[in-house]
Image (cartoon, rainbow, N blue to C red):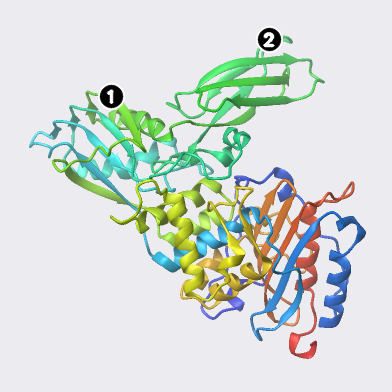
Amino acid sequence: MTTISSWFPGFRTLALVSLLALPGGVTAAETTTKAAAAPAVRTVEELRARLEAHVTQPRFSGALWGVKIVSLDTGRTLFEHHADRLMSPASNCKLYTGALALDKLGGDYRIVTPISGSAKPDVAGELKGDLIVSGRGDPSWKVRGSKKDFWTIFDPLIAVLEKAGVRHVTGDVVADATWFNALPNGAGWTADDLNDYYGAEISAISMEENYAELRVTPGATVGAPCGFAMVHPHTGLMLDNRTRTVAKDGKRRIEAVRLVGENVVHVFGELPVGDKEELVDLTVPRPAGWFAAAFKEALARKGIRVDGNARSLRWPDAPAVTAASVKLGEMASPPLRELVKTFMKPSQNLETDLIFDHLGELRRTAETPAARTAEENAVLALKDFLKKNGLPADEVRFEEGSGLSRNNLVSANATVALLKFMAGHREGRGFAESLPVAGVDGSLRRRMKGTPAEGNVQAKTGTLRYANSLSGYVKTAAGERLAFALMLNRSTPPAGRTSREEVDDVAVLLAGLAARSEAGR
């Protein structure tokens, strides 16, 4: 298997990781496509001819392509097609958020969450007042996809309190998410996004990616309502059961709908009698409140008594920490390079936007307008990063960091420029290793299997309705390193064909190129 370790000295071999979670903002179909088998490309001229023929086919007459392919070894452009066209990149935006974070903060950076009290605990361990967790957007508070127990999320926090000698809290447990001056949704998201896991609320205190799971099981008899069991505790969600059990040969269909601004989840559909259970994702409103309620029980389980309530704060509330508060300790996230990998591989929207908003708040100063959000600050930081490093800032128009916004625009030219810049960056290894690998892991784990791209192409996917992107790195059959950006918008593929296959076929051609660009100008 070819890996990034063979491209740049010192890169370690990529592990063959199979992620269980589907990518944020991506459907299951994205992970099941395969590229068409194609004969090897013998010359660069042949590559150009085949790519030009591919992107100008009649079926793309109503679609838009933006393509650029550049050699990292020679700097030469092998192919471009409307490379300056502004396109909807979808989750290709995460390339920019990851690069910005690694450039500004470095791969060793950790997000530090302060833990405070209204007063210092006395010799008996009694904290007279409130216990306050002041969130900074750490996305790592989760056990989803692992075999760990839910309550282990709180172990590092409880360890801080035990070290501080806290045994009894007379006041409340407060989850303070006010550090983010931000709305709970990203700019440009649509209302229906908020009902799905990939549109979970953005909060400076987030847990389990801010969505819970409901286990739905068929009833004992036909006509009976299905059974419900929440997998995650203390969500504050109320369930409206509108399901029924159907005959054994009936169809499975379960749909959950939570109206914006409400905590009632209406669950519709049917399960056949005797059939297997269905797990349904439910976004949790005010996730800091969920955290506070669960944290209070976690404390009790560890023998730390709380007399008061569990409560949460978020913008525009005032912070809970005052001049009289006492810092009890802090909890640090994993290194940033691991956080970037964790959102880039599976294309996780919330975790990307948490890092984006964290960058925005770090930029805030006394001169920053109070009305400017963390997200707006991060967009300004991105523009500064692009301009400072000679990248085409005018061809990057973002309003949020994950790519769920339909208003984000970028060109293939800008994306390849970013990829080239990061290939020579001090954090280039962490950036490259964060990308999904074709046929191996992340959102590419089931794509391009059995082709020269498998185990070779390292690229960020991007999928929205009528938008599909694939941008990253590949090593050709001739050993040349390429950076590429493939963006396809407004395509309506024929039956039996997907837009993912259209971009995957290009990546496979690049992997099979048998000539170097020096010989093919």
Q: Secondary structure at mark 2?
A: loop
Q: Which mark is residue 309?
A: 1
Q: Position of residue 521 (x, y in %)?
A: 79, 88
Q: Residue at x 62, y 50 (%)?
A: 407
Residue 195 at what x, y percent from top left?
Answer: 59, 32
Q: Is residue 281 positioned above or below 347 on the image?
A: above
Residue located farthest toward the right when viewing the structure as drawn? 58
Question: Callout 1, which amino acid?
Answer: Asn
Residue 85, image quadrant: bottom right
> Which comes before the other along the chain, label 1 or label 2?
2
Extreme residue in the left direction = 123
Q: Is residue 71 left or right of residue 155?
A: right
Local packing at callout 1 (Cα closer than 10 Å; few below 14, some 14-19, many 20+) is some
Q: Amino acid at mark 2?
A: Ala
Q: On the image, numbered disc 2 is attached to which residue?
A: 224
Left or right of 89 in this view: 33: right
Answer whether residue 456 is visible to the viewer in this image: no
Q: Count of labels shown?
A: 2
